[in-house]
Image (cartoon, rainbow, N blue to C red):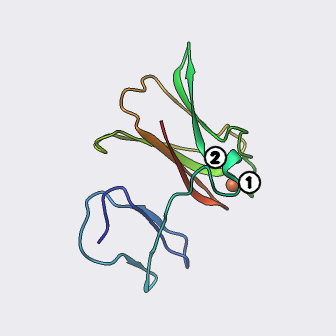
Amino acid sequence: MSKRLDLYKCNICGNLVEVVLSGVGELVCCGEPMEYLDAKSNDSEYGEKHVPVFVDTDENGIEVRVGSTLHPMTEEHYIQFIETISEDKNKICRQYLSPQTSPIMVLKDKADIKNAREYCNLHGLWESVM
Ligand SMILES: [Fe+2]
């Protein structure tokens, strides 16, 4: 059974889906069950460039940066999105990213942020708690 905000990937076509409302059925794409994505955290290899970091800024509010050392943003290897989730999981904010941009999401207010996660096209899903 899927849970709200779970992410699943099709390993055949690359579809990536987020559960908006949960159900009991199995998620299937291209005729195969989709893979549940379990977010990695700081204790995993490559964590330094993938785990989201929260930075308070005077002018901008709060930045969610991907990596304590910023992740590369090349055509071949980049962060595809950053997402923040509130503690009650009722408020989600997602920033899509493109190569050659910065792997940083800027938010005015940190009140509705409990955790952040990001998706790297090569290294998958990562998360951290604020
Ligand atoms: Fe990566």
User: Amino acid type of disc 2?
Assistant: Ser
The residue at which mark 1 appears reads as: 75
| Image-quadrant location for residue 3 | bottom left
- The quarter of the rendered structure image containing the N terminus is bottom left
> Can you give x and y, in whole percent of width and height, for residue 95 in the image?
50, 41
Residue drawn at point x = 71 percent, y = 39 percent: 70
The residue at which mark 2 appears reads as: 98
Q: Quick one: 56 or 33, which is closer to the camera?
A: 56
User: Amino acid type of disc 1?
Assistant: Glu
Q: Counting other residues with Cα less than 10 Å from the Cα at mark 2, is it few (<14), some (14-19), or many (20 or more)? A: some
Residue drawn at point x = 44 percent, y = 41 percent: 115
Secondary element at image label 1: loop
Q: Quadrant of ligand 1?
A: bottom right
Of all residues, the one furthest to the bottom in this rendering is: 31
Q: Count the marks: how many? A: 2
Of all residues, the one furthest to the front in this rendering is: 43
Query: In the displayed structure, would residue 70 be above or below residue 74?
Result: above
> Can you give x and y, in whole percent of width and height, for residue 119 in the image?
57, 54
Q: Counting other residues with Cα less than 10 Å from the Cα at mark 1, is it few (<14), some (14-19), or many (20 or more)? A: few
Residue drawn at point x = 60 percent, y = 46 percent: 51
Secondary element at image label 2: loop
Q: Quick one: 117 or 29, which is closer to the camera?
A: 117
| Image-quadrant location for residue 111 | top left
> Can you give x and y, in whole percent of width and height, for residue 20 in the image?
30, 57
